[in-house]
Structure formats: structure tokens, C-alpha cells
Image (tube, rainbow, N blue to C red):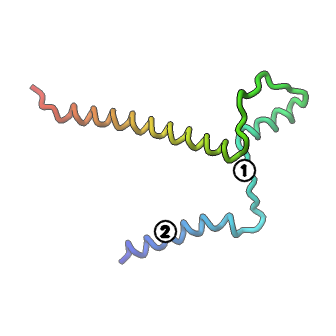
Amino acid sequence: MIAKRTSWLLIALAAAIVAAPLLLPGIEGEFKGTDDQAVSAIAEARPGYEPWFKPLWTPPNGEIQSLLFALQAALGAGVLGYVIGRRHGRSSASDDVPRR
């Protein structure tokens, strides 16, 4: 009975955390990446700064940029999970082999 009550309490707490930014006044979400913050900080510190290089390709909009970032993160997580799984499997297999 207590486990069921705790589960519902945790679900309510999670819903409150998700809903709070939407319902609280004064919270306006303009999401800026660290690249944008760095550009504005450099422009503030040195107004005449010219970048050394220009990007080879710029995504047409922010959604494409976010998609590419998410794909990059997913690919990295997949590679990391694969490597960890292989190492874990190799160590488990070597533990199963009887020693002479």
C-alpha cells in the first residue's frame, strides 16, 4: 500500500515539475546555446572582432540544427553503449572460463 502511495506521489511531483515553468508568471523561455552566448560575450568584450573562419555550411533553420545535434548525441551514446557492452561482455566471458 505504501509503495503504491509513493508511486502516485512521485508521479504528482514529476507533473508539478513539468508544469511549473508553464504556469508560473515571469518565466519566459528564450533558449540560447553556448555558441550564441559566446558570440555576444566576444562582441561585448571586443566590438571590432572578426572571426578567422566561416562555417562551410549553415543549417537553414534552428530546428535542423537541433535535429543534427540530437542525432550527434544519439550516435555518440550508441557508440559509447556499444563499447561498454563489449567490454562488459568480454570481462564476463573471461570470468566464466575455468582456470587450470
14 or 30, nearer to the observer: 30
Q: Nearer the viewer, residue 70 or 85?
A: 70
Instruction: Tell me which corner region of the image, top left, top right, bottom left or bottom right, holds residue 15.
Output: bottom right
Horizontal and vertical percent for residue 59?
70, 38
Query: How dense is the environment of label 1, judged by Cα within 10 Å: few (below 14), some, or many (20 and up)?
Result: few
93 relative to 79 in the view: left or right: left
Which of the pair 80/61 is nearer the observer?
A: 61
Which amino acid, mark 1?
A: Phe
> What residue sits 76% from the left and 40% below the top?
37
| The furthest residue to the bottom | 1
Residue 78 in the image: above or below residue 4: above
Where is residue 27? Give x, y as percent: 75, 62
In this view, the mark in front (2 or 1): 1
Residue 76 in percent (x, y) is at: 50, 36
Taking the view exactly as shown, the residue that stands out farthest to the top is 52
Residue at image coords 76%, 36%: 38
Give the CA separation, mark 2 to mark 1. Answer: 28 Å
Q: What residue is at 70 percent from the left and 70 percent from the top?
A: 23
The circle drawn on residue 88 is none
Quarter holding residue 28: bottom right
Read off the residue under disc 1.
31
Point out the image quarter for the N terminus.
bottom left
Left or right: 21 as drawn, with respect to 100? right
The residue at 39%/33% (across/down) is 83
Q: Quadrant location of residue 70?
A: top right
- The residue at the far left in this view is 100
Helix, strand or loop at label 2? It is helix
Q: Which residue in the structure is indicated by mark 2?
A: 10
Q: Residues within 10 Å of mark 2 (few under 14, many from 20)?
A: few
Residue type at mark 2 is: Leu
SS for dot 1: loop
